[in-house]
Image: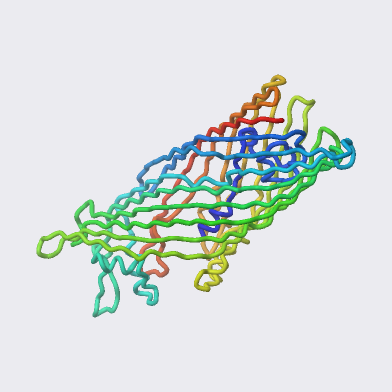
């Protein structure tokens, strides 16, 4: 389910002008980021354009777990936009009727997955081995990626008298230390081919086809160790997992922008689901250190096979309603309201014929519809210089409750604050934007038990802040 939300939670980042104004560009146009929101924005262009937008950012995650506080960060340089727009005037060269047909091609970044996370706690009252032992005892849940590894490294024991699996940490009352590290990288980019029509400089319509390229890699290491030396036999273990996901999807967008008067613009657009073909590669390994009755300490290692699995993913429909007001030709205010039903996300067509019926039911149980808001403003200081500011609010996609319990992530919203600056002259423009993102998340280091036979693990709290600077260099002709 986490994957379903990750790949459905797109928050477009393209040019510095749009980024500095909170990406509230659904009714404005004249900027390639807006094409990813409302393709009618292509019709606003009066001339051709070539633009390139690199960015530099740092992602910092602060974790709280078992009264311990840690933080880690990751730096990233990449491109959020590359685009080209051509303007074709109508043969009549009239200012009424069909004035121009504009064609645009390029890409915008939809998500950046890069982060490093470190979380640690002491005196734990549960263990990852609880999950392993419970799965083994439930029957039919033995996996060569989990239970098989724990058995091979002598962490999972079997009691022939009680006919059940157990582990030393539980036997001696827990109290061990825990640490988990996450290393994530990857991104999601949308490559767009769009067309926009300008009718009498009053009505603009557009359509686009998008190809979305997705890559995500996550490597984790979970370590538990007996810092107090009060667990018989057990010294420590490390459980490593590696997930690599690659996907290619396609979508379509249609939109319209209407100017009732020159000072007001109204826009609306619909995005089809993105239909992904996905591939996962997954593998795990486990190492342990155990001191036996003879006083000898031995280390054990075990490795899972390499899993390669194909499936499809269908993200939700999106609808965006936009408005903008031009203020005495010196500034503007703009707003976008985007509707997304995250519970409509669906997995389909597993490579072995798996239908994902239970997973899709869980998605409907956990996620909900949200209304995302983007606000932006621009003020022209001189004919050449402009100042910008913006704010984006993405409510949590989690329902307040699911499976007869409260969801702690229901209040974890996503906020973006932005400032920008622009310069243009003689067909050349340069923009810069600073964006600060803040969000939070509760999560478990390992799955909670399905029965009351084992204690419920404590959740860790992760607070993420991303600071990013985007530059755009562009030419109009």
The C terminus - image quarter: top right
Quarter where residue 148 is shown: bottom left
Horizontal side of 350 relative to 425 (left or right) equals: left
**Residue 316 seen:** yes
Between residue 463 and residue 36, name the one nearer to us: 36
Horizontal side of 7 relative to 174 (left or right) equals: right
Percent coordinates x, y for residue 40 in the rendering: 75, 44
**Residue 167 seen:** no
Horizontal side of 436 relative to 116 (left or right) equals: right
Q: Is residue 166 above or below residue 285?
A: below
Quarter where residue 235 is shown: bottom left
Q: What residue is shown at x 35% (from left), y 51% (from top)?
A: 180
Q: Is residue 253 above or below residue 325?
A: below
Percent coordinates x, y for residue 396 in the rendering: 58, 51
Percent coordinates x, y for residue 75 in the rendering: 44, 38
Q: Residue furthest top?
A: 382
Q: What residue is shown at x 35% (from left), y 45% (from top)?
A: 68
Between residue 34 and residue 294, name the one nearer to us: 34
Q: What residue is shown at x 69% (from left), y 34% (from top)?
A: 49
């Amino acid at each position: 389910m986490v994957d379903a939300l990750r790949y459905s939670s797109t928050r477009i980042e393209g040019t510095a002008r749009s980024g500095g104004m909170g990406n509230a560009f659904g009714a404005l146009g004249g900027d390639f980021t807006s094409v990813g929101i409302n393709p009618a924005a292509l019709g606003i262009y009066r001339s051709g354009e070539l633009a390139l937008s690199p960015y530099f950012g740092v992602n910092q995650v602060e974790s709280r777990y078992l009264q311990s506080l840690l933080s880690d960060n990751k730096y990233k340089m990449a491109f959020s936009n590359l685009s080209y727009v051509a303007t074709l005037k109508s043969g009549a060269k009239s200012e009424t009727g069909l004035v121009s047909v504009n064609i645009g091609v390029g890409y915008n970044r939809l998500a950046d997955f890069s982060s490093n996370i470190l979380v640690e706690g002491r005196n734990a009252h549960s263990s990852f081995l609880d999950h392993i032992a419970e799965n083994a005892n439930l029957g039919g849940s033995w996996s060569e990626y989990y239970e098989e590894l724990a058995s091979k490294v002598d962490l999972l024991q079997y009691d022939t008298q009680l006919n059940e699996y157990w582990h030393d940490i539980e036997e001696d009352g827990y109290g061990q230390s825990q640490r988990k590290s996450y290393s994530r990288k990857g991104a999601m980019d949308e490559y767009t081919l769009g067309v926009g029509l300008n009718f009498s400089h009053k009505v603009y319509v557009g359509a686009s086809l998008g190809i979305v390229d997705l890559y995500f890699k996550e490597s984790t290491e979970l370590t538990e160790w007996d810092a107090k030396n009060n667990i018989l036999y057990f010294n420590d273990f490390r459980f490593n997992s590696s997930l690599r996901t690659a996907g290619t999807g396609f979508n379509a967008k249609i939109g319209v922008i209407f100017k009732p008067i020159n000072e007001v613009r109204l826009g609306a657009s619909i995005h089809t689901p993105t239909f992904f073909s996905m591939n996962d590669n997954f593998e795990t390994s486990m190492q342990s250190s155990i001191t036996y009755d003879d006083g000898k300490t031995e280390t054990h290692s075990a490795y899972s096979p390499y899993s390669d699995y194909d499936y499809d993913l269908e993200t939700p429909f999106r609808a965006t309603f936009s408005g903008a007001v031009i203020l005495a030709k010196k500034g503007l205010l703009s707003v976008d309201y985007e509707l997304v039903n995250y519970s409509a996300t669906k997995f389909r067509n597993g490579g072995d014929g798996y239908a994902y019926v239970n997973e899709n039911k869980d998605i409907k149980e956990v996620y909900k519809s949200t209304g995302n808001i983007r606000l932006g403003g621009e003020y022209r200081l001189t004919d050449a210089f402009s100042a910008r500011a913006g704010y984006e609010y993405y409510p949590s996609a989690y329902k307040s409750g699911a499976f007869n319990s409260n969801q702690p992530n229901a209040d974890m919203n996503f906020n973006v604050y932005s400032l920008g600056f622009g310069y243009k002259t003689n067909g050349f423009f340069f923009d810069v934007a600073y964006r600060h993102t803040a969000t939070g998340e509760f999560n478990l280091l390992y799955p909670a038990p399905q029965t009351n036979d084992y204690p419920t693990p404590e959740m860790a709290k992760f607070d993420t802040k991303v600071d990013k600077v985007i530059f755009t260099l562009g030419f109009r002709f």
